[in-house]
Image (cartoon, grey):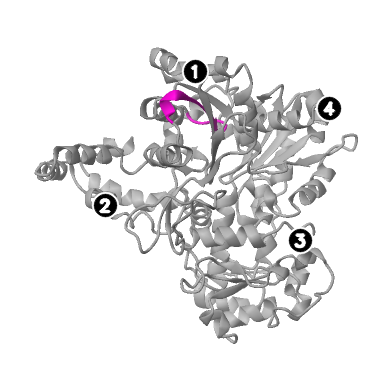
Amino acid sequence: MSTTVVVLDNGGGLIKAGFGGERDPSVILPNCLYKPLTSKKWLHPNPLNTTTTTTTEQDLTSASVRRPIDRGYLINPDLQRDIWSHLFTSILHINPSQSSLLLTEPLFTLPSIQHSIDELVFEDFNFTSLYIADSPSLVHLYETSRRPDGLLSKAQCSLVVDSGFSFTHASPVFQNFTLNYAVKRIDLGGKALTNYLKELISFRSVNVMDETFIIDDVKENLCFVSVDVARHLNIARKTGNENVLKCTYVLPDGVNYTKGFVKYPEQATRYLVDGDGKENLGGGGGGDREIISQQQPQKPVDLTKNEFDLTNERFLVPEMIFRPADLGMNQAGLPECIIRAVNACHPHLHPVLYESIILTGGSTLFPHFAERLEKELRPLVPDDYHVKITTQEDPLLGVWRGGSLLASSPDFDAMCVTKAEYEELGSARCRKRFFH
Amino acid sequence: MEEDGSNSNRRMSSRTRKVATKMVAALASSDNRTQAALARLDALENDNAGFEAADPNIDDDEASLDDDDQVYMQRKQSKGTKRKTRQAKALEARKAPRTFLELLHDANLESLPPHVPTYLKAAVGPPSSTARRHFCTVCGFSANYTCVRCGMRFCSNRCQNVHNDTRCLKFVA
């Protein structure tokens, strides 16, 4: 069959879709429908990477969101069908009945969910064939192909740390297969972090509980991982321009600008210089004054101009991935998660796994994520082993690029389940072919 | 499939389920503080506050109907086009997608033999050290004091006042 292969990384937050063999996905689309206050219909969000087609400005203020994926798994196939058919017909312009599909699926997908996915692919969309891949092996595949001489490709084994929208996985991969008995999961991802930030801001300054999209933007632009939490907490306590962490974000007012933005972009990166603040940009009070202003607004700008300050929230939010216990979750943090995943493997693999940790997923985009992880991981790993953490050049797309590689390999057609086989054997038996 | 079993008092069950989605774990525990903490964690996975109620065309009309009412409803709708009735039926059958926790419960993963890796076994498990840092719920800095009534943390007298005025015993929805 010389059909086109559609590669679809169906994430809980973003769909990455494109054609096999290409380097970048054709489209990155939020995997949701949204409904602004002004609309009665659920609308499809605009793709992120194409700016030319976005003719209609989307108003994301206080928009409600529906996502087909909950806690990482597809729970609403109907909604997913809507989103996919919009994607296939209006954005990718493909005919599913003449293409095959490479779809990513989270690890340990429940049989009932697998069944509904198969139904969706073969019965609703009529794809000619389907291959289900798990994301860690695709990341491994991509990284090995990028560095054919590296340790990764020689040992054929790596530890993929995927911190995505719904959860965080540490999964050892060996010979392109994910060792599923060793995979460990933390139930924290970008969505929980956004919601946590939302909660903090709503408590402390402005009520933003309905502003999912805006707070997502705040998180992406302002949050960072602190390498030394105690020191950063002390800095956040300072007042005036000594407080290099303080940063102001302006909410959209719907008249002059429809998107929120960081008031002084220089402020956002001031924490990197570490020393005392260089110029007095923000003025006003630091963390302590901010607290007063909640009770009796001393700075009237806070209420009229719709802006809020962030200080310690900027690093305490991503901090939760490292210490979920601080949030009250009974789960170990990311460093311990990695240790446990490695320890569940054969001892011969341990040194190689520690030396080939690959970070991927949107939540690893926080600045200093890798540094902090290495700092915490090093004391936990036996002295004889090296720890090497590789970051992907584009953590959002790592999985998709692996999928694109796999789809362009000559064996791909043989690995797929065809529609005829699905009709003959049914969902459960077809699934056996993918060894998950 | 619990809802199907208790079909006779379906209105009751649909109402309790609305509470349960937020507080499902909390209801299992008797302690008020753990309940609030669990509900708060559960809220972190919510999509958008109050979105369920904001769906006018599907949920509101049909969510609270008994079986008899549904028959009546269909008859009423059949005055319109035939296609619409079918659509309504399909919507009805598939409305209110089940949450992941319900699906997980149905999959009955506990019954699998212990060597099979499953979703439940992949969870990382409790941390090795139970020590947890406490941050002030008001300002975010490290908190040394605990509210005697609700157990939330605060760091100073000022934060305590804010806490008492605005948050104490007002659990996060």
Q: State which region is magenta.
A: A95-110
Q: Position of residue A228 (x, y in %)?
A: 79, 59
Q: Earlier in the sequence, mark 4 or mark 3?
A: 4
Distance from disc 2 to disc 1, alpha carbons, whole Å, reads 38 Å
Residue at x 27% of width, y 35% of height: B5
Question: Is residue A103 a member of the stretch shown in magenta?
Answer: yes
Distance from disc 4 to disc 2, alpha carbons, whole Å, reads 58 Å
Using the image, name the chain to which the residue with label 4 belongs: A
Q: Which residue is mark 3?
A: A229
Please rate how many residues cluster around mark 4, counting C-alpha atoms within 10 Å: few if below 14, some from 14 to 19, many from 20.
few
Disc 3, SS: helix
Disc 1, SS: strand
Q: Earlier in the sequence, mark 1 or mark 4?
A: 4
- Mark toward the viewer: 3 or 2: 2
Residue at x 57% of width, y 65% of height: A200
Quadrant of the rendering where the C terminus of chain A is positioned:
top right
Q: Amino acid at mark 1?
A: Val
Q: Which residue is mark 4?
A: A149
Judge by depth and name the residue closer to the eye, A251 or A196. Answer: A251
Q: Amino acid at mark 4?
A: Asp
Q: Which residue is mark 2?
A: B57
Q: Which residue is mark 1?
A: A417
Distance from disc 3 to disc 2, alpha carbons, whole Å, reads 48 Å
Q: Position of residue A22 (x, y in %)?
A: 62, 33
Please report contact status of discs 1 and 4: CB closer than 8 Å, yes or no: no
Judge by depth and name the residue closer to the eye, A383 or A123. Answer: A123
Q: Amino acid at mark 2?
A: Asn
Please report contact status of discs 1 and 3: CB closer than 8 Å, yes or no: no
Labels in figure, total:
4
- Mark toward the viewer: 1 or 3: 1
